[in-house]
Structures are given as C-alpha cells and as structure tokens.
Amino acid sequence: MKAKILIEVILVYLLTQILNWFLRPIWFFKWESEVLGFSFTGGLINISISLLLIYLTKKEFKSYGIKKENWETSLDVGLFSWIFVVFPVIFLIFLGLDYMKLLDSLILGGAIVGSLLLFLVILRKQENQERQELDSETDSDEKMGSRTKTNLILLAILLSFPIILAIVLTMNPAIIGRSISIITFQVVFSGFGEELRYRGYFQSRINQGLGTPYNFLGVSFGSGIIIAAAFFGISHIFNSFSPFEGIFTLEWGWGIYTFFTGFFFGFIMEKTRNLIGPGISHSSDAFGQALFLLFG
C-alpha cells in the first residue's frame, strides 16, 4: 500500500509536469500569458486534473480537505498566517534580498521557518486561552460567526487594496488590468489551485499511505508534508524550463524558497484539515505581487 501510493504520486507528478511542458509552447497559451500575464486556461486545466485525480482515488473529497466542516476556523488560521508568511518576506525583499538567488532564498527560507514556529506557538496559546474563556457552546458559535464576518471583510479589503492603489496612483488601464489579473490568478489558480494539488492531493494522498505519526505543537503530520513541499519546490525550479522550446533554465533559488513556503502551507493544512486555510495563506502572493507591480 505504501509503495503503491508513493509510485502513484511520483508518476502523477512527472506526467503533469511533462503535460505543462507540452502545453507551454502552444500559441494560445503563449498569447494568453503575454496578454494577461498568466495562462488562465492552463490554470483551469491543472485544477481539473487535480479534481479528477482525487475522484479516481475513490476516497471521499473530505479526506483531501475539500469540505465545509471547520471552514471558519481554517479561514481564520489562513488569514492570520499572512502576518507570518507575507509581511516578513516583503520586509526582507525591500531590504534587497531576492528569492530567485540561491543564498537569498536560503535566508528567506530560514525566516519562513522562524515565522512558522512563532505562528504555531501563538496558535497553541490562543487555543488554550479560548478554551478557558468559552462559557457555553452558544457563546462559541456567536464568537466564531462574528470573527468569520470580520475575516471575510478583512480578506476582501486586503485583496482589493492593490487594485484601488493602482487606480488612485496610476490611472493607467494597463497597470490596473494587470493588477486585477494578478489578484484573480494568484487567488484562484495559484493560491487555491496549487494548494488543491500539492496539499490537497499530494500531501493527503501520501498521508493515507504513510500516516501522520509525528506531532509538533498540537499538529499531527507525516512524510506527506515534506514530500509535497519538495514537489512544490521542484515545480518552481522548472518554472522557466521549457524543453520543447529549447529553454533549459533552472531556478534553484525559487525552488528552495517555495519548498519552505510549501512547508508552511503544509502545516496549515495539517492544522485545519481543510484546504481553505492553506489556500488563503497561499493567496497572500496576490497581495505581495500586486504591490510589487506598483512599487517594485
């Protein structure tokens, strides 16, 4: 069972990577990337493949984090993670670090690990404090409902803020359009789309075979979190690699940086058992990239 699942995920990873290389030179995907900045059709294909893979395993979608249970808590954890995964990275980048450079990516990776540790410690303390403060189940539901509304409003503000800035500061239709494109793609196809594949399918599928025997600060995890993060990092190493176009560039710095961010997202997945959390956390890229478009 263990070997079968490992062979399955490795083959799936290789085949989907080859498919992406095959699609990249096709004129429509190139045109889409030139005009919109991204291939939305390619993103849609990747999401469809991930859902098909999950369906073919004949397991409930819930076991891959696709469920409504606990979504409010997962939203809360995912949005709270922005403080630890976005702003430290933006700060370090403004100091001159470049995640595309090998040494800089290692420094950024170390910062992400430190942020993850602090994040998990604070979450653990908050959970213990909330257990002591709750007077009744009704109070708990009311507090969570109020917090969820606040989180949704805050998320909408954060994601619309770069677009509003682009309108106010530039009044340039091209920049405004690119800001909208960045936010849309990074939330839907990169944020939730990639999390569906790497934390939803890969990480959960590996956990089904190898289990989650370890525990750290109240989070149970296993080899799936490492392997999925490695797949995530390797895919970014090959981001510029396009063998059917004769391009063999490897982005080692980007791969190392995204391995660490994938590790961070993986812990959110294990913490909440719901894809909303890692999807929201990963969507923070939309905020950072849209701001970088204006001020980078």
Image: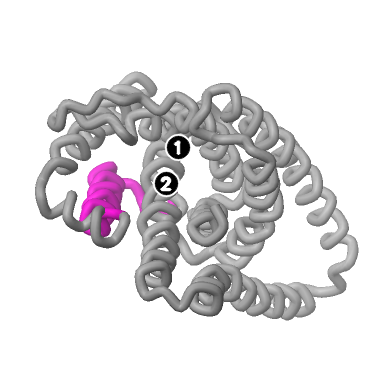
Horizontal and vertical percent position of residue 58: 28, 46
Horizontal and vertical percent position of residue 158: 59, 69
Pointer 1 with pointer 2, Cβ within 8 A? yes
Given residues 96 and 201, the one toward you in this image is 96
- What residue lies at 65% left-to-right and 45% top-to-bottom? 94
Q: Is residue 39 magenta?
A: yes
Residue corresponding to mark 2: 200
Give the distance between the C-alpha atoms of the residues marked 1 and 2, in whole angstroms. Answer: 6 Å
What amino acid is at disc 2?
A: Gly
Horizontal and vertical percent position of residue 269: 55, 47
Can see residue 277? no
What number is the disc on residue 55?
none
Tell me: 137 left or right of 62: right
Q: Is residue 44 magenta?
A: yes
- What residue lies at 65% left-to-right and 63% top-to-bottom? 76
Please determine whether, in this image, residue 64 is positioned above or below residue 105.
below
What amino acid is at disc 1?
A: Gln
Residue corresponding to mark 1: 203
Q: Residues within 10 Å of mark 1 (few under 14, many from 20)?
A: many
Instruction: Give, as a single range, the part of the protein colored magenta.
Output: 38-63
Element at label 2? helix
Element at label 1? helix
Magenta stretch: helix, strand or loop mostly: helix
- What residue lies at 49% left-to-right and 77% top-to-bottom? 167
